[in-house]
Image: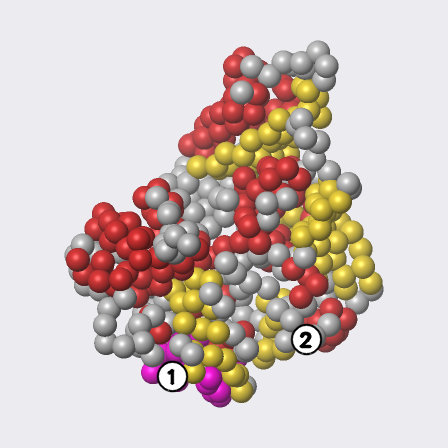
Amino acid sequence: MKLPAFEYACPATLAEAVALLAAGDGDAKVLAGGQSLVPMMAFRVASPALLVDLRKLAGLRRIEITDAGVRLGAMARWRDIEDDARLDAAHPLLKAAVAEVAHYQIRNRGTVGGSIAHADPAAEMPGIAVTCDAEIAVVGRAGPRVIDAGDFFVAPLTTALAADEIIVEIRLPAWPAARRWAFKEFSRRRGDFAMAGTALFYDVDGGGRAHNAHVGAIGVGDRPQRLAAAEAAINGAAVDMVTSERAGAAASAAVTPQSDIHASAAYRKALLGTLVERALQSACA
Amino acid sequence: MQVSFEVNGNSVSVEVEPRMTLADCLRHVLRLTGTHLGCEHGVCGACTILVDGAAVRACLMLAVQAEGSKVVTIEGLSNDEALTPLQASFRRHHALQCGFCTPGMIITAHALLSEEPDADADRIREVLSGNLCRCTGYISIVEAVLDARSAYRKPAP
């Protein structure tokens, strides 16, 4: 499958890239790592008239860690996150989720911003962004703006990003050292998209009770989502076997996945419940 | 578009359409047909090459994106007629049957062992999960990679 014909531009500045997208009038697309876009073009799911390659924008590949949290440049690659030892403490949940992203060769090219913009409902990074209340900083013809991850993902492969906007940075709030967390997903073959997955965390008060629970789910809906019912089952409770089971059941009941060739809706629903339960047991261990 | 990069130590400058993948450029323009194309959408791993030292799928990269990079293909792993220790290990362990996936397997394993010469069988399996062998000779492939590790370990100072 050869790619459809397109024009190619490789701007040296962000402003130039935005101008090219704006001039493309909806028919131009950003090329980041190309690990989702290129296969989509091979299948003719996408056939943009212009690709705007961001590879010269070296500033977009930075990973910044401050007291306010972690800022991932949109062009940071999975491999960059994997290799960044600072993130083991600064955001262990991110690190664990990224370890599950795709295969070795894909991880050497695929980018954080590309995954967020692609918005696959089963992808790990959008799930982390939604679970962790991330902010997505973008820039377009009208200037910069910041979009809450919860408002960013609209439908499968559809986001709040305008045609002339480029993701610049993903901002994850600071991570307290004592926070309990886990990431679990299940796929039949390592590196494949998950049939279901969960990212979750909570904080523990002096009395051993959980609060600030965040439970995210991927692969079980048209976009990554937080599961309020599962969070309610955790908040105020001591996280143990019983709480884990309750939260798992609440998570399972809260989602309405679709059936496809990889798994039936009923299976995905059950799988999510099991994963949330196991994630909580590993988080409290 | 004109694009210049380095392939197996030689500078090349080629005229390509933007839509040409790096894999097709290597095979059809530069006639380096050791890089195999299986699925052409980033699933099978047969087209794996090294770009600036990292194993990547050549079917998911445009030739124009390679501007200024150092590319190494299966042809570039050995400078003479002799097999590299990794290649010899593949032969010793009968780690290839039809041979179609082999260039991608060898490049991937070479990238892994260059960085992690002590990778264990689990790590090797994890990394090679991005390379499909439809003869399903995975056991001998993993054994061949395990056996080649000593050649990648630096001698003790």
Range of residues picked out in magenta: B11-31
Residue A148 visible? The answer is no
Indicate the position of residue B3 as horizontal and vertical percent values: 52, 83
The residue wearing badge 1 is B30
Tell me the CA gap for discs 1 and 2: 27 Å
- Quadrant position of the C terminus of chain B in the picture: bottom left
Secondary-structure class at tag 2: loop
For mark 2, what is the residue?
A11
Relative to B126, A148 lies left or right: right
Q: Is residue B136 above or below residue B104?
A: above
Pinpoint residue A93: horizontal percent, then vertical percent: 59, 37
Q: Name the amino acid, label 2.
A: Pro
Which residue sits at x=54%, y=70%?
A47
User: Residue A284's spot in the image, x, y percent?
Assistant: 57, 21
**Image height check: is A205 above or below A16?**
above
Amino acid type, mark 1 = Leu
Q: Residue at x 56, y 14 (%)?
A: A240
